Image (tube, rainbow, N blue to C red):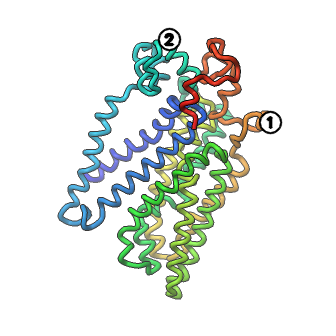
Amino acid sequence: MLIIGRLMIGVYTSIGTSLMPIFIQELAPPNIKGALSCFVHIAVCGGSALGAILSIDFILGNKHTWHILLALPAIFGFAQVILGIMLPDSPNHLLDSGDKRSAIRSIKFYYCFQNFDDDVAIQEYQQLVTHLPKQISVSKAFKEPKTRKGILLGMVVSFTQVFCGSMATVAYSTAMFTSVSFTKVLVPYMPALGSLFSILLTLPALRLVETCGRKPLLINTLILCALANFMLMGFSLVSQQLGVTWSSIGFTLAFFIFGLGYNLGTGPVSYFIPAELVRPEAAGVSLGCAVAVNWLSAMITTLIYYPLNVQVGGYSYLLFAIPTTIAILILQKWLPNNGHLKELSQNGGVILTCNITSLIDDDSAYGTFASSRRSTAPGQRIPIYRHITV
């Protein structure tokens, strides 16, 4: 039953991880789409922190209360179902389905357009949010060379998010610190402290993801992750072979550098970059493939790392350092940038989906500021837009 339950949780998690970025794409204005997507990572870290805290031995992680700990996800699941029923569907989906009345209620719910009449509310929404068109099939997406390339790059990004060592540090952080003779009193609290630390480190990413550009942020933070993995290997070998006490301090520093790199960029942006590397019609396919690679990578790393660490010690960190280094080279060469639109168009750069609405002059694309239905002058912001800008 436990195995069946885990499989069901895995299916739900993969579906939810695929749908959440699409849902955000349908709701968020382009200028805060990346920052809003970072909250997915914050929520994941928050859930991990709560689980780690409740798993501490004197709370619920002992032989007398473990069954209560096991039942808590079911309670949270029921709460999610109830809240999900209360939340309206996205206005984008409802408008495409021809359900105007429900779409208006959804618009007023998500954007607080309570004082607008129905037609004005729809017009303001269409000027504010990018329209996500009907999704194409997997076979059609892979037949298009540019779309196929974007999907493959998204899969590399998702692969790197896990193979940089993220899942292993969550699953085996206590074993990692025990292996370098870290202070035994603190070791049981490392998962909880690490998750809380991850939330704090992700907060700057809310700004960096929009100001630094996706590619520079991803590449630079991956470099930090790769450097940290080589440092973890070095300090682990020193501790295991020489037994010097300062190696545990160096190991902690390397762990901090890894957390810095992963939570500032690699972790948060990997959730939504795959959808931005393809045309909007293929966003669902790209995210689905990326999530499949992500969870397959998570399964492989969690199964392989611990026995590998037992056999070869500190050299086990090469499992993360080498793939991360290779991925950096691939992404540096092939990943498109999402810098300033005018600069990209002048230099012939590739423009990501998240920036495309400023270049389209088509009433079918929500967020088009040159729309013939606009009552404001070109280049002038509508009042609602000012309230949402960060």
Res 119 label: 2
The image shows residue 371, relative to residue 184, as above or below, that is: above
Towards the viewer: 68 or 390? 390
Q: Secondary structure at mark 1?
A: loop
Which residue: 55% across, 25% down? 384
Three-letter amino acid code at the position of disc 2? Asp
Which residue: 48% across, 44% down? 39
The part of the image, by quadrant, that contains residue 149 is top right
For residue 29, side relative to residue 117 (left or right): right
Q: Residues within 10 Å of mark 1 (few under 14, many from 20)?
A: few
Residue under pointer 1: 348
Residue sitting farthest toward the left: 64
Which residue: 62% across, 34% down? 354
Closer to viewer: mark 1 or mark 2: 2
Q: Secondary structure at mark 2?
A: helix
Towards the viewer: 178 or 87? 87
- How far is mark 1 from mark 2, CA to CA? 39 Å
| Count of all numbered marks drawn on residues in the image | 2
Residue 63, image x and y in percent? 20, 66
For residue 25, side relative to residue 333 (left or right): left
Three-letter amino acid code at the position of disc 1? Gly
The image shows residue 307, relative to residue 272, as above or below, that is: below
Q: Earlier in the sequence, mark 1 or mark 2?
A: 2
Res 140 label: none
Q: Residues within 10 Å of mark 2 (few under 14, many from 20)?
A: few
The part of the image, by quadrant, that contains residue 360 is top right
